[in-house]
Amino acid sequence: MSRLDIVIFGATGFTGQKAVEEVARGGKDYDTLTWGVAGRSQDKLESLIKEVSKKTDRDLSKVKLIVADVKDEKSLKEMCSQTKVLVNCCGPYRLYGEPVVRAAIDAKTHYVDVSGEPEFIETMQLEYNAQAQDAGVYIISACGFDSIPNDMGVVYLQQNWEGTLNSVESYLSTYVSPEYSKEAVKSGTINYGTWESLVYGLANSNKLPALRKKLFPEKMPSYKPKLLPRGALHQWGGGYCLPFPGSDNSIVYRSQRGRYEAGYRPVQFRAYVKFSSLMETVLLAFVGVLLYAMTRTKCTTKLLLNYPRFFSGGMVTKEGPKEEVINNTHFEFQLVGKGWQKDDDIEATAPNKTIIGKVSGVNPGYGATVVALLHSALTILREKEKMPGNGGVLTTALAFWDTTLIRRLNENNLKFEIVEKK
Ligand SMILES: NC(=O)c1ccc[n+]([C@@H]2O[C@H](COP(=O)([O-])OP(=O)(O)OC[C@H]3O[C@@H](n4cnc5c(N)ncnc54)[C@H](OP(=O)(O)O)[C@@H]3O)[C@@H](O)[C@H]2O)c1
């Protein structure tokens, strides 16, 4: 039996359904694709297909439905054996991800997901990289808003730079169109699955240093000038900036570490999030500290999980945000790269050139995310010969460096551009 091109697992979840809608809508990228949906309930899968069919006005009767449960390894292996690439939307990944990765490797199936959980992602690299290489499959996490804009954004700057790029600092800003901001406050902007992943991630963040020691027993040399953190709060570009709490620092570090191991000078990277009002910035910093403090005990962690709406200041709901709100949420990463032009003496002179790139789009969590995820899967299907080696657990930058992924994303409203070189 020939394999489907892709199967979307966790299709009945909030993100999974958005991925199904994106493929169902069709277009030149998807029309020739053979695909299926998978989840733990046949009834839910049937209702999903009915709903998406109605919403997109497409006949989806030929879409294959596969029942698979994370708790049943046999069902996972059977699911993976039916596809070339598994698109895994089933998270939190620290709870549900590992058996799926194992099944994908066993079935010799490529795998992509939208995890933003460094502990899961780095554990997969530590435990399964060699097995994935032996099986000849690519296991690639963080193919969504975490962390394609920053990881591929740094690649984009590197590919548009003639010389040596020393550092990149990234500034993320988001806003909801004013006419939808009342609805955003009323119905929230984030689905519970992301909150759950964040809370578990914070609760277990103390495990990361030991994991990283095992993953990278040898330190990378220190490159000069060293890119220092800018502290808890700083001003840049007319706004107030806090360190970005997502997985992007860890993902870009792994990408650049991979580049270093391949014999290239790595780029130093730091991510920030930018706000226009000082009050909002201070309030969010306070919420961040409170969340972290609450994840120090099991009892307060439970409170966070049980009362997401309250502790997220109304942003997180179990029903998920309204379509009109997410479709009118805009984001922009400004990536500021510094380094030397070709033939400069990088030991004797300070960095003297700057490049500014921008990665922008709408609907970061559920629109840009599923576009980036699905195009990562399509890139494996269609450009495997341009990917490095024979598989492995890789970051997006390492996997897709030589492919046309950025061009594909540009054609699909996730825009990469160079705005200034000086
Ligand atoms: N990187 C990014 O930018 C980004 C953006 C969005 C989401 N995410 C991540 O994506 C993940 C999912 O988020 P979400 O909001 O879509 O969550 P969600 O709506 O809760 O979806 C979770 C999915 O997992 C499935 N599931 C749970 N237990 C299972 C089991 N034992 N066997 C099979 N399936 C099982 C659920 O199936 P049922 O429907 O049967 O319950 C559901 O389909 C989270 O980790 C989130 O952080 C990342």
Image (cartoon, rainbow, N blue to C red):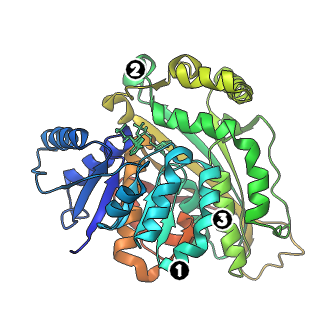
Q: Which mark is residue 308?
A: none
Which mark, by number, is residue 134?
1
SS at badge 3: helix
Q: Are marks 2 and 1 in contact (CB under 8 Å)?
A: no
Name the element at disc 2: helix
Please tell me the numbered disc located at residue 126. Answer: 3
In the picture of the structure, the residue carrying the numbered disc 2 is 187
Of pointers 2 and 1, the one earlier in the residue sequence? 1
Judge whether residue 355 can be spotted in this image: no
Residue 345 to residue 89: above or below: below
Mark 1 vs 3, N-terminal side: 3
> Residue flagged by tag 1: what amino acid is it?
Asp
The x, y position of residue 91, in whole percent, is: 47, 44
Badge 2 crowding class, 10 Å Cα cut-off, few under 14, some 14 to 19, many 20 or more, is some
Question: In the image, what residue type sits under mark 2?
Answer: Ser
- At a point 81% along the width and 69% down the height, the residue shown is 220
Q: Would you call the spot at circle 1 few (<14 residues within 10 Å), some (14-19), or many (20 or more)? A: some
Residues 253 and 234: in front is: 253
Q: Residue at x 42, y 35 (%)?
A: 329
Label 1, ligand 1: CB separation under 8 Å: no
Q: Amino acid at mark 3?
A: Leu
Residue at 24%, 38% in the rendered image: 44
Q: Residue 394 at what x, y percent from top left?
A: 56, 68
Mark 2 vs mark 1, foreground winner is 1
Determine if residue 111 is in view.
yes
Q: Is residue 289 above or below residue 394?
A: above
Q: Is residue 346 above or below residue 233?
A: below
Q: Position of residue 237 (x, y in %)?
A: 66, 41
On the image, the x and y values in percent for residue 118 come to: 63, 51
Is residue 237 toward the left or the right of residue 176 in the image? right
Name which of mark 3 and mark 2 comes first in the sequence: 3
